[in-house]
Amino acid sequence: VWRRRGECSAACNILQHDRFGGGSVMVWDLENQFKAFREKAADAMPGSDWTPFEKNSSLPPERADIVIVGGGVVGWSIAYWLKQKEMIRDGVRVLVVERDPTYSQASTVLSAGGIRQQFSLPENIHLSMASADFMRNINEHLSVLNDDPVDLQFNHSGYLFLASEKVAHIMEENYSTQRYAGAKVSLLSPTQLKEKCPWINTDGVVLASYGLENEGWFDPWMLLNAFRRKAISMGVYQCFGEVTGFSYTTNTMTTAEGDKVDFRRIKYANVQMPNSLEYQPVECAIVVNAAGALSGKVAEMMGIGLGPKDTISGIPLPVEPRKRFIYVVHCPNGPGLDTPFLVDYSGVYFRREGLGGNYIAGMSPEEEEEPETNNLEVDHQFFQNIWPHLAHRVPAFECLKVKSAWAGFYDYNTFDQNGIVGMHPLVNNMFFATGFSGHGLQHSPAIGRAMAELILDGGFKTLDLSAFSFKRIMTKEPILERNIV
């Protein structure tokens, strides 16, 4: 039963479990006393807004229906769609909590900004198609009265995948899946590839796949800010802070075999203010874990993965940060304006970056070469692994200069490199929207809509993403995506 605003809080009489349910503490007593004192002071001086205790205006609200942990593009997309689906204004109180107020370390703005339909799973293809449609008509969704129209700076040059003889059959299978799903993709022979891209060296290429529409790249910050700006205009609360723990209740049930299972329900999300010891417990009905690369740690705050082995509570959320480097190179004689987002079978990729002969390039390291994730420092030496492949595929790149570089984190799903979408079986009000392993940005519009349907409608309506539920991790049945970049 949720209390209405203005009603006397009964929380001072409630025993809440601490972070891992190991004990119980009285909450709100001191805050209620402060609140009563402030009200008494206000009654004594009705003409003044003075208060004997300074109130921090940056604190989140004390109550929210839904707390979204993570203010990246996925989190803000979910917030937007939740407000879009509410039946009455302010019918759903949504709070987005983001730990990085500058977004300088946010994975969204540190990505390559690509969108493609060329996946191997129908679910991922449909997510891309729905998201591309949303972006194509973005001002019908995210325009704000009296603000400038949204311009994603979308470059529709498409993705170009190259296949060697070893993996050509996989490209053909993916092509059939993509066409069946409705994606506009074309297969090219080496001769056709050379006609389309005269600057390319086709040595070793036996087949190429090119996206004819709804593919290319855009400005990630523009999409994030458009979702954020629109959601706030619709009444979403934002808070720059860090969720450091949860208060929850526990119900223990016994199975027919005599095993005890703990079911937990979050009551409060504790939000720590930046550079401060101050924190605010936020009473909530639902928590959405959209914390990206840090979502595994957020899950651990609810004891997920910390239980006995070979039990559901002992299965962790298999999402961890993986650092990826992106290098900005200059090549005055490189490919021109119609250059696609090229992905070589070696794993190296590049695309044009603006005008004037600038490009960005990158490559995922081998498993045993994964860099440390305790910082965002760039390993400039790693480019030496990339350059030979670039120069082999595009001879003009034999003469290039690295101008700058940056690093960002993938929310890498170590289980099967696909998103985890839905509710945890033992924490019945924590939902996941994470683990997209590098394609969360491009799928964010469709993911947000799907999550809003799951939360408010009780199930998926437009796209069935049930294959991405936590259940597959419990049953050890991965759904592998073969086109991971």
Image (cartoon, rainbow, N blue to C red):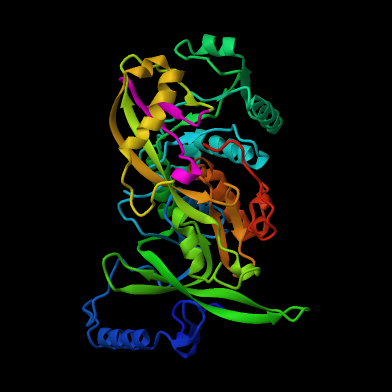
* Residue sitting nearer the eye, 136 or 477: 477
Give the position of the N terminus as an image quadrant: bottom right
Relative to residue 231, is residue 240 depicted above or below?
A: below
The number of callouts visible is: 0
Residue at (33, 88) in percent of width and height? 36
Residue 353 is one of the magenta-drawn residues? yes
* Quarter of image, res 39: bottom left
Decide if residue 65 is in sight here.
no
The spot of residue 235 in percent (x, y) is 43, 58
Decide if residue 201 is in sight here.
yes
94 relative to 374 in the view: left or right: right
* Residue sitting nearer the eye, 268 or 318: 318
* Residue sitting nearer the eye, 49 or 453: 453
Residue 349 is one of the magenta-drawn residues? yes
- Range of residues picked out in magenta: 346-369
11 relative to 476 in the view: left or right: left
Residue at (47, 45) in percent of width and height? 368
The spot of residue 394 in percent (x, y) is 43, 17
The spot of residue 105 in percent (x, y) is 34, 50
* Residue sitting nearer the eye, 85 or 366: 366
